[in-house]
Each structure stands twice: as structure tokens, then as C-alpha cells.
Image: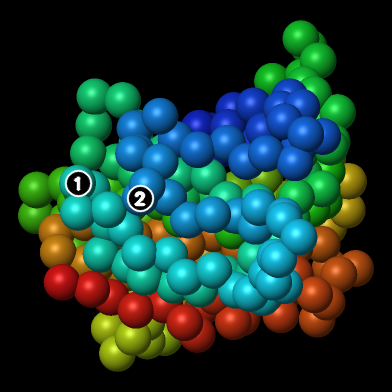
């Protein structure tokens, strides 16, 4: 489920850290997508090159069940991935410095801690009879029962492109994951029989900085397509 998918995020973040392609100026692309359907992250330089646009517009491929469009800062790291043997899909956006963090040691199941900003979009089919209210209640219960490292600040209804959604804001200082206390905002909404979850994380020391401003631009640009 989308709640248990948290552990896939930890493994995925460790995979990103092991990547050395950032040193070559290249960007990973999901093997499940045709290259032509993925946005270009870095412009190809030439004698007649023009400055890169500050934002990239993401439009999903017709082959995947993603009904979202959005803009994100062109310097962010981008990766999208389809879960094997399921209809689940994810999009990961982050400060590119996350790729320079040390790789996971064998005795570190959660990877080496860091505090770089990230945005993670999860999309999974709803379970039979499941509603947004069910998901919100389950997540609220899970946070309230979590260890003392995660503190719920507030939760509230919001709108995403006019669609009803629900947001949770927490503080997370889990030492196995982060090097500083992180502010996290998780948003849930339902589109065409699928639950969409957007996780935003930023160090409390970086609140209001460049990455969070990029996230706010991304969030305000979100459009729900057909």
C-alpha cells in the first residue's frame, strides 16, 4: 500500500546516493519509459546555446496512469519509476546534492542520514471501497502511534487544482534518516481511482530557502488532467 511504500523510498534514496552519474552531468531515466517522453534536465551546451529555462514542465506519458502536470525547477534531480508487477508509479524530485551523500553501509538499513530537500509523488490504485477519508484516517492514526521522533504539527483540508485534498505537517528527527530535524508535508488526494500522495521534506534550517520556494512553485503549478 501507499503507506508501506515509505520503505521503498528509503531503499530508493540509498540507490540515488550510490549513483556517480551526477559527476558526469547526466541524469538517470526510468527504463520503463521511452526517452522521448521524459523531460530534459540539463540543456546540451553548444556555441549557440541559450540559457536554460528556470522551470521544466512535466507532462505524463499516455502509457502510464498519471493524471498530473506540473512545473519544477530545472536544477532539481528528476526520476520516475513504475513499480514492478503493480500499477503503482512514483516521481522523485530532489536537491541534486542528495546524490553526493555517502552510500549506505551494510549495517545501515535506512541508508546514511542526510537533510537535503526532496519531493516524492506516489500514485497507486485505490483498494476496493477505499476513500480519501479512509486514507486520511489511517495515516493520522499511524502518525499518532509513531515513535517520538515524529511529531504531528497540524492537518487540514486543501485544494489541488480545485480538487479536495488533505495535508499533514510533521517534524521528523529520526537519526537513522536525517542529520537535522526535518519539516515534512504530506498531501493526499484521489484522481481517477488512484490515490496520489505528495511528500515534501526540508530541513528546518532551510525553511523559506531556495528549495522550499521551488516546492511552492511546483505545488501551485499542479494541474489534474483527463
x 45%, y 44%: residue: 80
10 Å crowding of disc 2: few (<14), some (14-19), many (20+) = few
In the image, residue 116 sits, relative to residue 133, either above or below, namely above
x 34%, y 38%: residue: 33
Q: Quadrant of the C terminus?
A: bottom left
10 Å crowding of disc 1: few (<14), some (14-19), many (20+) = few
Looking at the image, residue 172 sits to the left or right of residue 36; the answer is: right
Q: Is residue 9 visible?
A: yes
> For residue 193, which quarter of the picture?
bottom left
Looking at the image, residue 49 sits to the left or right of residue 162; the answer is: right
Question: Dot 2 corresponds to which residue?
Answer: 37
Looking at the image, residue 224 sits to the left or right of residue 96; the answer is: left
In the image, residue 146 sits, relative to residue 140, either above or below, namely above
Return the x and y of residue 6 as percentages of the image width and height.
51, 40
Q: Secondary structure at mark 2?
A: helix
x 88%, y 53%: residue: 180
Question: Dot 1 corresponds to which residue?
Answer: 63
Return the x and y of residue 119 as percentages of the image width and height.
59, 58
Number of marks present in the image shown: 2
The outermost residue toward the front is 47
Q: Is residue 118 visible?
A: no
Q: Are marks 1 and 2 in contact (CB under 8 Å)?
A: yes
Between 210 and 49, which is closer to the camera in this rendering? 49
Between 29 and 221, which is closer to the camera in this rendering? 29
Q: Quadrant of the N terminus?
A: top left
Circle on res. 51: none
Mark 1–mark 2 distance (CA, rounded to whole Å): 10 Å
x 22%, y 39%: residue: 87
Q: Earlier in the sequence, mark 1 or mark 2?
A: 2
Amino acid at each position: 500500500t501507499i503507506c508501506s511504500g515509505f520503505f521503498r523510498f528509503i531503499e530508493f534514496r540509498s540507490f540515488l546516493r550510490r549513483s556517480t552519474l551526477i559527476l558526469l552531468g547526466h541524469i538517470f531515466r526510468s527504463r520503463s519509459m521511452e526517452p522521448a517522453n521524459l523531460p530534459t534536465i540539463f540543456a546540451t551546451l553548444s556555441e549557440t546555446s541559450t540559457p536554460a529555462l528556470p522551470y521544466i514542465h512535466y507532462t505524463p506519458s499516455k502509457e502510464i496512469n498519471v493524471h498530473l502536470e506540473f512545473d519544477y525547477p530545472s536544477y532539481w534531480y528528476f526520476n520516475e519509476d513504475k513499480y514492478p508487477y503493480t500499477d503503482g508509479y512514483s516521481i522523485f524530485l530532489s536537491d541534486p546534492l542528495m546524490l553526493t551523500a555517502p552510500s549506505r553501509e551494510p549495517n545501515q538499513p535506512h541508508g546514511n542520514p542526510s537533510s537535503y530537500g526532496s519531493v516524492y509523488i506516489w500514485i497507486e490504485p485505490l483498494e476496493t471501497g477505499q476513500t480519501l477519508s479512509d486514507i486520511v484516517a489511517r495515516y493520522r492514526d499511524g502518525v499518532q502511534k509513531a515513535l517520538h521522533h515524529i511529531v504531528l504539527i497540524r492537518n487540514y483540508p486543501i485544494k489541488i487544482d480545485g480538487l479536495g485534498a488533505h495535508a499533514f505537517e510533521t517534524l521528523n528527527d529520526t537519526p537513522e534518516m536525517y542529520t537535522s530535524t526535518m519539516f515534512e508535508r504530506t498531501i493526499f488526494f484521489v484522481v481517477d481511482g488512484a490515490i496520489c500522495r505528495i511528500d515534501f521534506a526540508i530541513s528546518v534550517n532551510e525553511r523559506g530557502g531556495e528549495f522550499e520556494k521551488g516546492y511552492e512553485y511546483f505545488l501551485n503549478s499542479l494541474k489534474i488532467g483527463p
